[in-house]
Amino acid sequence: MASLLGEVLFEADGQGTAPNKDFYQIIITQNEVIWRWWKISIRSEFRGTPPGEIKQSHNDFLQDDRLQEQVGVVFGPRTLEYILALCQGHFNYLERLPDQLLLKILSYLSCQDTGHLSQTSSRFRKLCNSEEFWKQIVLRHCDMITEDMEMLAKGMGWRNIFLKFYYNKEEHGSTAHPAEEEDKPSTAASP
């Protein structure tokens, strides 16, 4: 699993909260925390001020309450919490898997589990609502995809094909995928 980790584990940049106009960057590598800032001011005494930089080991950052406070002010408490977890060695390997591998794994989940997973992050929401995901779900329920199915999918979308022809509420429980409720086709007509 360690091979899934690149040298840079996390990177963010942004402007400080008002009235501060300074620009900040934080980079978390496998070994250190890099905090950079650029002074933005119209005052003459700050013109030509070089950027600042602090490099610390993960352990030193975990002990540096002042720097943690600065990071929290600029990037927010959730980002600080995530950075602290990275510095403590808590990596989210699932988020680091390539999309194609995640799509294959997701295709084995129930619709209810897929719905819950799609609510955990924007990346999973995007994957769980992608045409590629729903095509894999349809493939799991039939032997092969014919040209007619491909043409129908271009017009209807793979999710609608699954909901129309393969989804059975009794088989999968009464809780549907959140996206299914709004896009679910009527069952009155069939091809």
Image (cartoon, helix red, strand yellow):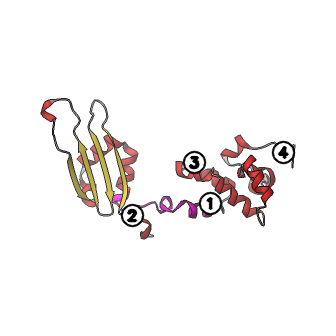
Instruction: Decide whether the magenta segment is chiefly helix, strand or loop.
Output: helix
Query: Circle 2 sits on which residue?
Result: 6
Give the percent coordinates (x, y) of residue 125: 58, 49
Q: Which residue is mark 4?
A: 187
Q: Are marks 4 and 3 in contact (CB under 8 Å)?
A: no
Q: Secondary structure at mark 4?
A: loop
Q: Which residue is mark 1?
A: 106
Instruction: Give residue 101's quadrant in the image.
Output: bottom right
**Label located before the other in sequence (1 or 4):** 1
Q: Amino acid at mark 3?
A: Gln
Q: Mark 3 sits on what residue?
A: 119
Task: Tell me the amino acid under the disc marked 4.
Answer: Thr
Judge whether 89 appears above or below 122 on screen: below
Instruction: State the separation of the CA atoms marked 2 and 1.
Output: 24 Å
* Residue kind at label 1, given as amino acid type: Leu
Measured Cα–Cα span from mark 3 to mark 2? 26 Å
Which tag, 3 or 2, sits closer to the chain's start? Answer: 2
As displayed, is residue 157 above or below residue 141?
above
Residue at (32, 60) in percent of width and height: 29
Which portion, as a residue range, is magenta?
A: 86-106
Q: Marks 2 and 4, how far apart in space?
A: 48 Å
- Which element type, helix, strand or loop, lies under badge 3? loop
Spatial distance from mark 3 to mark 1, Cα to Cα?
14 Å
Say which element carries label 2.
loop
Of badges 2 and 4, nearer the viewer stands 2
> Mark 2 or mark 4, which has the lower sequence index?
2
